[in-house]
Amino acid sequence: LMVAAAIAVLTLMPLSSPQIGGIEQSDKIYHAIAFAALAFPVALLQPRWLVLAVPVFAAFGGIIEIVQPFVGRECSLTDWLADLVGVALGVVAGRATAVSMPVAWRLR
């Protein structure tokens, strides 16, 4: 919930994000990283919740894009697609981490 709250605050603030080097669309990278951070712990710790969590995360990203014009930001389909890519990356990274962990750690 804290990651979701941070994402909501940061994406609804009327500030622009700094560009990463010379990358023109660096905000897409920020979106992907944020939503990967949102999906990763669920994929790692509660993979059964992913059936519900992934659609909720997708809807969360979409709602943020719909609300952004009301706070002086721009609604962007590509931002939402970056959110979805981030969710997918977070799920893959979380599951890969869980599978690669020693069995003894997983039993705790």
Image: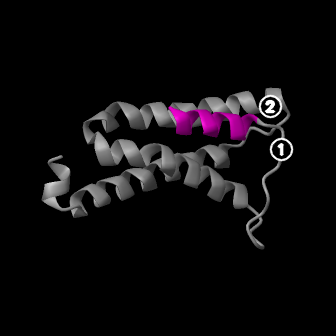
User: How much space separates mark 2 and mark 1, taking CA atoms?
Assistant: 13 Å
- Estimate the x, y position of residue 56 in percent, counting from the top left: 46, 30
How far across and how far down the image is residue 17, in percent?
Answer: 78, 53
Badge 2 marks a residue whose secondary structure is helix
Using the image, tell me which numbered label, if any, was put on residue 64.
none
Q: Main secondary structure of the magenta part?
A: helix
Q: Does the magenta stretch include residue 9?
A: yes
Q: How crowded is mark 1: few (under 14 residues within 10 Å), some or many (20 or more)?
A: few
108 in relation to 72, above or below: below
What is the three-letter code of the residue carrying label 1?
Leu
- The amino acid marked with disc number 2 is Pro
- Residue at the image point whose x is 44% and y is 56% from the top: 89
Q: Which mark is residue 15?
A: 1
Q: Where is residue 71 in the image (x, y as percent from the top left)?
A: 82, 30
Q: In front here: 34 or 101?
A: 101
Q: Is residue 44 magenta?
A: no
Q: Which span of residues is magenta-colored?
A: 1-12
Task: Name the residue beneath numbered marker 2.
Answer: 69
Q: How crowded is mark 2: few (under 14 residues within 10 Å), some or many (20 or more)?
A: some
Along the line of sight, the residue nearer the viewer: 63 or 94: 94
| Residue 100, image quadrant | bottom left
